[in-house]
Amino acid sequence: MKPYRTKSLIKSISVFLSVLFPSLTVAEEFTARLSGHWSPKHQSAIHSQLFADEVTKRSNGRLKIDFYPSKQLFGIREVLGAVTSGAVELGGVVGVVSFPSINKNFNVASFPGLFDSYEEQRGFFQESEAGKSIWADITKKSNSKLIMYNPVGPVMTFSAKRELTGVDAMKGLKARRLLKSEEPMWDVFEANRVSLPTGEVYTALQTGMIDTINSPPGSIEAYSWWEYLQYAQKPYQYFADAYIMANKTWFDSLPQDLQQLVMDVGQEIGNLSTSTILDAGEATLTKFQERGGIVTVLSGDEKIKFDQLMKEKVMPAMADMIDSESLQAAQSYAGN
C-alpha cells in the first residue's frame, strides 16, 4: 500500500473512533495564573490557594491554576489593571482599593457603619438597581468577571502609640493612608498621613514612620505587624471585601464545562471564606491580647462622641466622594 494511502487510512480510522468513542479524544488543557498580594498566611491567600487547587483537581488537570501570593506578580494597586489587560488571567482584588478609581460610587463600601455585614454589602451591589449599575460599570470597564468572594475582614484601628480609649486619644497619630476614603477620618483626628502599600507597612512601623493603621485583624498577624502594634479600637468601621476576578476575554474562551466548574468552585470556596473570616479575625484579636495587646471597645459617652464625630464631620466629607443618589440608595437598602 502506498504511504499516502496509509496515512489517509489512519486519519480516517482516528476520526471514526473519535466519533464512536469521544472519551478517547485528547482534551485540550489550559493553564492560568492567579495573582495575589497577600502573605501566604493571610486568610484570603489560604482560600485563593484552595480555589486554585480545587479547580485543578476537579478538572483532572484540564485547567491548571497556579497561585502566586506575596505580590510575586502584581501588587495590591496593580492587580486589577493586570487582569484588565490580560497580563494575568485571575487576580485577587480588594474592592475598596481598586474599584473607586473606575467608579467613585463604590466608595459606599467603605462608608463607616453603612452596611452591617458582608451579605448586606454584597446584596446592595447585586440586587439593588443603583448597586447593580455601579458593579456593571466596573466590570465592563475593567473587562473582568467576578469568580469568587474572598473577604479580607472587617476594618478597625490599630496603634503602636497609645491606648485608643476615645476621640481625644486618636488625635495627632501618624497613620498609614491606603484609601482616599480614609482621609476624612484622619483629617478629623489631625493625623499625619503616609501613603504606603502593604509590603512597606512593617518597616514603616519598625522605624516609626507610622504608628497607626486601619486594618482587618487578620492582616496584623499575617504580616507580623503585631510585633509593633499594641492597641486596638472597636467598633468595626466597614467590611472590606475582596474578590477573585477573571479577565473576561480569557474566561469566555474556556470550554463551557470548565467555565461552570470555575464558577462552582468559586461559589463553594467563597462561601467557606465568608463564613470563617469573622471568627478568624476574632481569633487573631484573642491572640493579640494574649501577646499583651489591648482592645478597647468604645461604649457610653466615648461611643456617643465617636459616632457624633463620624456623623457630623467624617460622613459629610466622604459624601463628597459619592454621588448623592448612590449614597441615598445604599442607605435606603441598608435601612439607614
Image: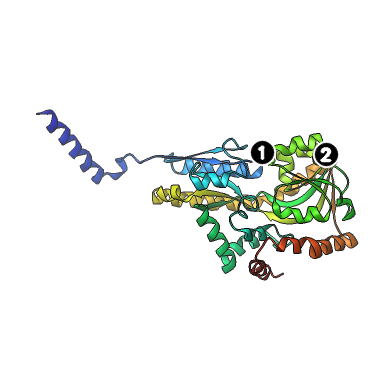
Quarter occupied by residue 137: bottom right
Colour theme: rainbow
Residue drawn at point x = 33 percent, y = 39 percent: 26
Q: Is residue 178 above or below residue 138?
A: above
Query: Within 10 angstroms of label 1, few (less than 14), some, or many (20 or more) residues?
Result: some
On the image, the x and y values in percent for residue 159 come to 82, 45
Quarter occupied by residue 29: top left
Residue drawn at point x = 56 percent, y = 64 percent: 132
Mark 2–mark 1 Cα distance, whole angstroms, equals 18 Å
Quarter occupied by residue 197: top right
Secondary-structure class at tag 2: loop
Name the residue nearer the viewer: 163 or 210.
210
Residue lying farthest to the left in this orientation: 1
Q: Is residue 203 above or below residue 241?
A: above
On the image, the x and y values in percent for residue 304 come to 86, 63
Q: Is residue 311 left or right of residue 123?
A: right
Q: Is residue 223 above or below residue 236?
A: above
Residue drawn at point x = 27 percent, y = 44 percent: 21
Query: Within 10 angstroms of label 2, few (less than 14), some, or many (20 or more) residues?
Result: few
- Mark number for residue 335? none
Q: Amino acid at mark 1?
A: Lys
Residue placed under numbered mark 1 in the picture: 41
